[in-house]
Amino acid sequence: MNKRLSVKHLLGIKQLTAEDIDLILTTADQFKEVLNRTIKKVPSLRDITIANLFFENSTRTRVSFELAERRLSADIVNFSASSSSVKKGETLIDTVNNILAMKVDMVVMRHPNPGACVFLSRHVDSKIINAGDGAHEHPTQALLDAYSIRERLGSVKGKRVAIIGDILHSRVALSNIYCLQKLGAEVMVCGPQTLVPRYIGSLGVKVEYNLRKALEWCEVANMLRIQLERQDIRYFPSLREYTMQYGVNKQMLDSLGREITIMHPGPINRGVEITSDVADSDQAIILGQVENGVAVRMAVLYLLAGRTDE
Amino acid sequence: MKVVLQSARILDPQSPHNGKSADLLIENGTIVSIGKNLTGDRVISSGNLCVSPGWFDLQVDFCDPGNEQKETISSGAAAAAAGGFTGVLLMPSTQPVVQSKSEIEYLLRKAQGLLTDIFPAGALSHDLHGKDMAELYDMHLAGAKAFTDGHLPVSDAGLVVRTLLYTKTFGGKIFASCDEHSISLDGKMNEGPTSTALGLKGIPALAEELMVARNMYLCEYAGAPLHFMNISTARSAELIRAAKKQGLPVTAAVNVCNLAWDDSALHDFDTNLKVNPPLRSRTDIDALLAALADGTIDVITSDHRPEDPESKVVEFDLAAFGMIGLETAFALARTAAPKLPIEKLAAIFSANPRRLLGINVPSVKEGETANLTVFDPDMEWTFTEKDICSLSRNTPAVGMKLKGKALAVANNGLWNFS
């Protein structure tokens, strides 16, 4: 049995095969079991040092990675842009090489520029895990989302998943599209036309601008946050108007006549993309996603650390 | 030194020998004789040897003064000669900007004694800010051959009209790049399936086309010639075609990289392919090739833009736009447009740019001063790092198999053999 990933880095879902994704999810099953033991720690990465490089603000992804690393007994160093030399004009390659010179084995990187991890993988000698690069990819989020759908609905194959919200600025959307399609799901994107990339249809997804129709179509709705901090110009007049057209509330869900699953990568803007009664309902698996995030990241770290090149 | 071109096809509509094959003897910078069985100290022969008036590139950056680590006048001139060019038009986007007589004079002084003729373009607006007119007349007197803000589009329509009107009386040429910023914003590549898959901000074709259309109206209103420096989309080509049909004094050029690569080449974030106007779709390329074939587009430029590793070996969003192109321009064009008749391609590279700029077109005939390019349009070769004469290395063409090669250039009594 081949228990190896086909890739050396996790740069994006784009580079993974369906078998890779499957391997990650089944490995995550084992780690999820570990996480529910009294002793939540395993020695798998005891000799591995991991640097978490966050060139952009992040709380949940950083904490999730850090916990996953600690649960695997890795040594870790954290580095964030605010405390770095980046502002002194050091290049990304120099910054990372300086850290690697201190004998670091793997790099987990969050970066504001699309392709930053692909770029880094070509210029430094280390295993790289993309923790989000601009509006490009956020592979571990997509993997934990797929894991959560599989856990809730039995499988991903054949499921109809709608990704709703700011698709244009979202790395979650792109990675989710690639991941869900590789696992055989049907994907729809939905949002105001100003926030849906004009050529998104070329990725083989359905496009819908009407929220009601998207909810009627799907079995899973993945609600994205409106990323005002990424919007350099106005794409809609106000959050109030956004919510009028794209906010999901309980009454709307109840009127569908069947229960759909609500997901959210967080952080939630309560009352904007979903109301509190939706976020806190049994239909929503938002906290389950967070829990699964640690298991899935443990699986990714474990599989990449164990992958040798001979 | 007596140089003989053996059995060379002469591609020069001004020459009585146009279309014929003959031996040419060039000595002391003059075409001494065109005939048979000529002998000399150095003989050039090739499978399909051709000779045309020296090629001319209407859009190059030599980064001098200000960024001499990227390129200098002499290194740029060497790159031009290696690529078959005997003349170039320098963009004004140096540091300081070329916007007064003294910068023009600096460039012309630096150009003395070089094989490649250097023609400076002056800034259209002060500091390239797109607000106030630079001293166009003074620069014209000093030798500026065109006025442009280079790759920076002039958003202010009124400024474009006023410069068209102002320069009309003394025959200054206005060159325009087209990009409507409110549409392109800080886009990094063509908007399309590839930008979507990469999460990179897209530059819609619309951004260029809107300003091409706007500039048509400005040109018509002013009744003065306007040159579109670097069109890249199918619709832009269509607009130029319609304007020419209408009799407007417009001309157009395309950058060779916009013929050689489509935007899908960017799939792994190669910053050497980050250019503006951005690489477009295959459909756009086909339309641009058709526009070259029917004369809608007059000129192909290398858009030679040297960049150092500090500007290119960085994250894609942060990388500078542009690639070097003088050494590969002809070969990339020939490879991208194999069906374009070689006579036409020779004109696109030699006579067309000079006419557009209003400068003398040299001729390949006996007794003329030798300003010529010797090339083989069918020679197949692989471009390597060793072929780069520029001080910068920012080209995605290394390792590419190309068709068509400049073998030698002669100008100002000098030879360069590639």
Image (cartoon, rainbow, N blue to C red):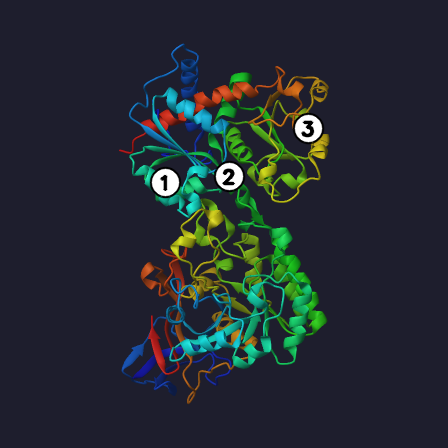
Residue with the mark numbered 3: A247
Which kind of residue does numbered mark 2 sit on?
His
Which kind of residue does numbered mark 3 sit on?
Gly
Q: Where's residue B353, x and y in %? A: 52, 73
Q: Work out whether residue A8 or residue A109 is closer to the camera in this orientation and state it.
A: A109
Disc with the residue nearer the chain's start (2 vs 3):
2
Q: Looking at the rendering, which quadrant does residue A270 occupy?
A: top right
Disc with the residue nearer the chain's start (3 vs 1):
1
Q: Alpha-carbon distance for marks 1 and 2? A: 20 Å
Which kind of residue does numbered mark 1 sit on?
Val
**Disc 3, SS:** loop
Residue with the mark numbered 2: A136
Nearer the camera: disc 2 or disc 3: 3
Where residue A96 is drawn, which disc sits there?
A: 1
Q: Alpha-carbon distance for marks 3 and 1? A: 41 Å
Q: Work out whether residue A210 or residue A298 is closer to the camera in this orientation and state it.
A: A298
Q: Alpha-carbon distance for marks 2 and 3? A: 25 Å
Direction top: furthest residue: A38
Where residue B44 is drawn, which disc sits there?
A: none
Q: Work out whether residue A296 or residue B63 is closer to the camera in this orientation and state it.
A: B63
Circle 2 Cα neighbour tier, 10 Å, few/some/many (<14 / 14–19 / ≥20): many
Residue sitting at x 69%, y 67%: B218
Say if labels 1 and 2 share a chain: yes
- Position of A271 compared to B74: left or right? right
Q: Where's residue B172, x and y in %? A: 60, 77
